[in-house]
Every structure is written in structure tokens, then in C-alpha cells.
Amino acid sequence: MKKILLSILTFTSTFTFAQENKQDTTKLNEIVISENRLQTPFSKQARNIQLITKEQIAQMPVKSINEVLSFIAGADVRQRGPFGTQADISIDGGSFEQTLILLNGVKISDVQTAHHSMNIPVLLSAIERIEVLKGPAARVYGINALTGAINIVTKASKQSAIDVNLQAGSSFEDKVAGDGKGIYGGAAAQVAINMAGKKSQHLVGFGINDYNGQRYNSSTYDHKFFYQGNIDFNESNKLNLMGGYINNAFGASGYYAAPGDKEAFEIVETALFAVGSSHQLGKNFSLRPRVSARYNWDDYRYFRNDLTRARSLHQTGVWSAELNSTLNSAIGDFGFGLESRSEDINSTNIGDRERYNHGAYVEYKTEAVKNLLLNIGTYVNYNTQYGWQAFPGLDMAYLFAPKWKFAFNVGSSQRIPSFTDLYLNQRPGNIGNPNLKSENAWQYELSLQYKSDSFNIQGGYFYRNISDFIDWVRNSSAVPYQPQNFGNNKIQGVNVGIGQSISLSSKSSLSYQLSYNYLHAGEMSYASNVTSKYVVENLKHQALGRLIYKYTNWQLTLGGRWIERELKNPYLIADVRLLYGKQNWNIYADVTNLLDKNYIEVAAVPLPKRWFALGANFRFAL
């Protein structure tokens, strides 16, 4: 513990810049959390929800959504490649398959494998906020939110403008291992065009990333497109449109089968769209229908220069239809809804598969008792492979003093195995298990929070029990990994956080944010000769910190993250950003991995060492 506290107190780099030279005036109690069910202001939430706002994103030395999430307490981001190439996201010690990913409330988690769930075609400059809901979230979002959900909410500005973001960087060192040719470097560019009218808003974004790789066969190139449209026919009837596409091509050396996959290469394409509307039918009743689809193409080439052997092609399609409603009454608010979802895959080593999922929910929220916030409900689900199941939950918070809140939560959830879990035939490395049962969880959580305008402190404890827990295991290097149900996976967690904003003078200010998470997993009943993918990677300690100093038009950001996983050596990653900006433009210089650490987050992929970058952001009013 002494070592952990020392790490927190000695954080000396990372985190932050500003697209505009303004104080962060975001009022969290004005934000309405975008759950698909009942809409609840952040200040009246009884759940453990963490937010990253657009102002906070604009203060981070980051290049992708993956890197933004690495600064969320309890969120474990394990990247196989930098700059948004590929990442596995887990919450509070769960596996990466147990976290549900959403975009504006639309489920976009990949049904082939969650390795592709973060293939998201959204520019950082187009994000309004990111909502991280921790704990079982079936009652809120349906199945597969076993340990939590991440909802990315895009902007809907009423001001017409063009935002341009440019960045270039390098390690100023020769690439190592293999070709060793040239200096490691790359660049990125993004353009977001917002066109706002009296009754409509249209956002169009384009982005491109191109990096030549810090080691042999590790280059990455992607381009993306995103569209969002909001049309207000009148105060009671509104239409929402969304579409996006991303093509991500990267060297995959060491991603899945090191050291034999030295020549591996992968191309992943993702397309999605959604059409939804909202209708206020009378003073107290609203209706919100929506249809959406997501397609994913995955071309994995074990030998990038030989497409005649060891090539895996996968194509998945998901169609969803949902209907959400809200009824406000004198005794509280009620939510009702239905959803239906079809999933299919056409694959060279998984086969042709399909399944269907249907769900319904009911929810009730009340503040009838003074200072008591109560939300209770259940989600009922039917899956063509796993039958019927119900997932009840209760959230309760008590405001026992000004600015103090005590909360208690209990809930259940389910994770249905992916197509890869069930049917993969990729010998000699990995094979699926069609006899897998679904994972089911119950979680209990207590938290205490104090929040004022300039100071906040919180602490919490949770206990989670996952039955029929799934892990990929093998008892010898001569046989492939295969997923198995391993009884109960019990985990306990403690988290603390503190933050403060201090005005030093009329020209300067200082703010800091510190957090620490400790996770303790119960012993799993593995045989002595069994190798587990999960235990090796499970998060154990996580300490995050950031410090932001502003003086007139200058801003300096320091921070870091200290991570320790089971059976892995801990590491401290530190970054720094210096920025100078005016209202409609800024320029900045970053140094990431300031301490030049060697570290691996997942698989056998060493991530970049010290990296230098220059960038600029411009806004042009239309």
C-alpha cells in the first residue's frame, strides 16, 4: 500500500490540453444521462456513472477514444496497437467481452469478437461526452453489459462551424526489430463540419491516421467517416439519423499467436447506421422508436504476402429494432420498452451462424420520499440459444446532508458467448466450444460522495459474483486454447477519488484529480497445469492522476497512470502537454511515455516508448 500511495503522490506527467482557452464551466448536474430507458440528470443518479465531457477530452494529450478511456477509474484499456488500432476494454476486473459498447445509445459491440468493438468511426472533436456505467447494466441496456457499459454521445451543436485538427509526431529513433528502416513517425488529420439551422443540425466528419510502426510489421492506417442528423419537426416530434464507416488496416505481429504471427496483417471495416425518432404524446407520455444496423468485415492474414493459406475472413451483420417509452405520473416515472435483435456471421473458420434475441423491460423511478432517490426495474430476455431469463435491479441514493450522497446498488446481468467463443476453428492456436453456457452475474455496491463547485471526494466498494464464468484455457502448449465455464468468478473492489479546482489569481488556476482502484479476485479452480488467458491479464491495482495549470493563454498538463495486473510487472506511464491557445485556435506540444518505459498491455505487443508530437486545432465559424 505504501508503494501505491507513493505512486499517486509522485505522478509527474500526462493528460490535458484545451481546444479553447477557457475555464471548464461544465455543470454535471445539467447533463442528462442518455440511458435508453428513463432519462435522469447526473446529479440525481443512484448508479456509479463516470463522465468525460468534451471540455475534459480537449484537455487530454490523446489521439483516440481508446486513450481517453484509459483515464477512467476502473476502466482497463489494453491496446494491441497505438493510435486507436485495436484495444480491449474491460471494467472493474471483468473480461473485455463483458463490457457493452454503445454509440448514442445504439449497441455497437461486435458479435464475432469484442476485439473489434472499439472500431468506432467517430472523431474525437465530434464527441459531446462519454458515459461509463459501472456494474451490471442489463436493466438499463439489455444483455451483454455484464460488468458495465460505455456510451459515446456525439455533439448536437446549434452553431455552424468547421473544426480542423492536425497532429504529427515521431520517436526520433530508428524502428527496431526486423526491417529497422527509417524513423518511427506518423500523422493524423480530422475535419468536422457542423451545419445548424433553425430546426435541424447535421454533423459530418472525416478523419485519417497514418503511422509507419515502431517495430517490424506494426504500421497502421485508417480512414473514417461519420454523419449525424437531428431534425425537429416541432416541439413534440423529432428525427435522429446516424451513419458511419471506418477502414482500419494494420500490421498484426504478435497480436494473437506470437511468435509465429510475425508476418500477420489485418483489415477491419465497420459500417453502421441508425434511424430513430422521439414523440411527446401528451403532457406525460413519450415514445422513442429506433432501428439500427451494424456490419463488420474482418480480413486476417497470417502471412501478409501469401493470401493462399492461413487467411481468415469474417462478415457479421446485426439488425436491431427497439421501442422505448416513458410515462410521468404523480407517484413517479415509469419506463416500458421492447427490443428485437438478429445476429449472423459468415466466416471461413466459424461457419455460417445466426441467432435472435428479444427483450422487454419495465422500470420505475421516484423521489416521493424526501432526499431519497429510488429506481427499480427488470429486463426480461429471450435468446434462441439460451432461452428465457430475467434481470432485476435496484438503485437507491440518499442525500443525507448538503452536497453528500450515499448510494446502494444491486443488479444482475448476462453475457452471451460470442460466435468466436462458440464456434472458432483456428487450430493450432484456438478453438471454440459450442457447449458453453452464458455468463450470469450479481453485483452489490456501496458508495459515498461529497461534491461542491470546486472540490469532490468519493469512495466505494463492490462485490460481484459471476456464475459459469468463461475463460480461454489450455493444459499444454501443444494444444489450442479453448473456452470453458469455470463455475463462479468472485471479485471485490475498492475505489477512492479526490479532485479540486483552485483559483490562484485572476490570470491563473490549478486543478488536480487523483483516483485509486484495488481489485481482489477470488481463487478460480484451475488445475495446476492449466494456463489461463484471464488470470494473467486481470487488473489488480490502478492509480490515475492529473494536474492542470493555466496561466492566461498558456496551459500545462501533467499526469500519469500506474497499472499492475495479475502475474505482470507494474508500470507507470507519464505524459505532458504544453498548449498556447486563443478562442478559435490553439497549438500544442506533447511528450507521451515521458519516462521512456517498456511495457505491454496485452498479448505480445510492446507499445511505443517516448513519443513527441506537435498539433493544432482550428475552428472556423460558418
Image (spheres, rainbow, N blue to C red):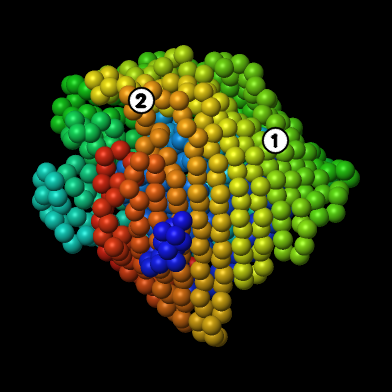
Identify the residue at image location x=56%, y=56%.
496
Q: Is residue 394 above or below residue 188?
A: above
Whether residue 296 appears in this view of the structure is no
- Nearer to the camera, 87 or 162: 87
Whether tag 1 and tag 2 are in contact, CB under 8 A, the answer is: no
- Which residue carries the number 1 mark? 393
Q: Amino acid at mark 1?
A: Gly
- Nearer to the camera, 250 or 96: 96
Spatial CA distance of label 1 from label 2 is 38 Å
User: What label sits on residue 339 in the rendered view?
Assistant: none
- Which residue carries the number 2 mark? 528
Identify the residue at image location x=75%, y=42%.
375
- Give the SS element for disc 1: strand
Question: In x, y percent, where is residue 460?
Answer: 61, 51
Q: From the viewer's perspective, is 35 left or right of 214?
A: right
Identify the residue at image location x=22%, y=60%.
171
Q: Amino acid at mark 2?
A: Ser
Instruction: Find the residue positioned furthest to the bottom.
Output: 506
- Give the SS element for disc 2: loop
- Nearer to the camera, 509 or 440: 440
Q: Is residue 564 above or below residue 453?
A: above
Question: In x, y percent, where is residue 533?
Answer: 37, 32
Q: From the viewer's perspective, is 552 left or right of 601?
A: right
Whether residue 366 appears in this view of the structure is yes
Q: Which corner quadrant of the image does residue 458 belong to? A: bottom right
User: Quick one: label 1, few (<14), some, or many (20+) residues within 10 Å?
Assistant: many
Identify the residue at image location x=65%, y=51%.
447
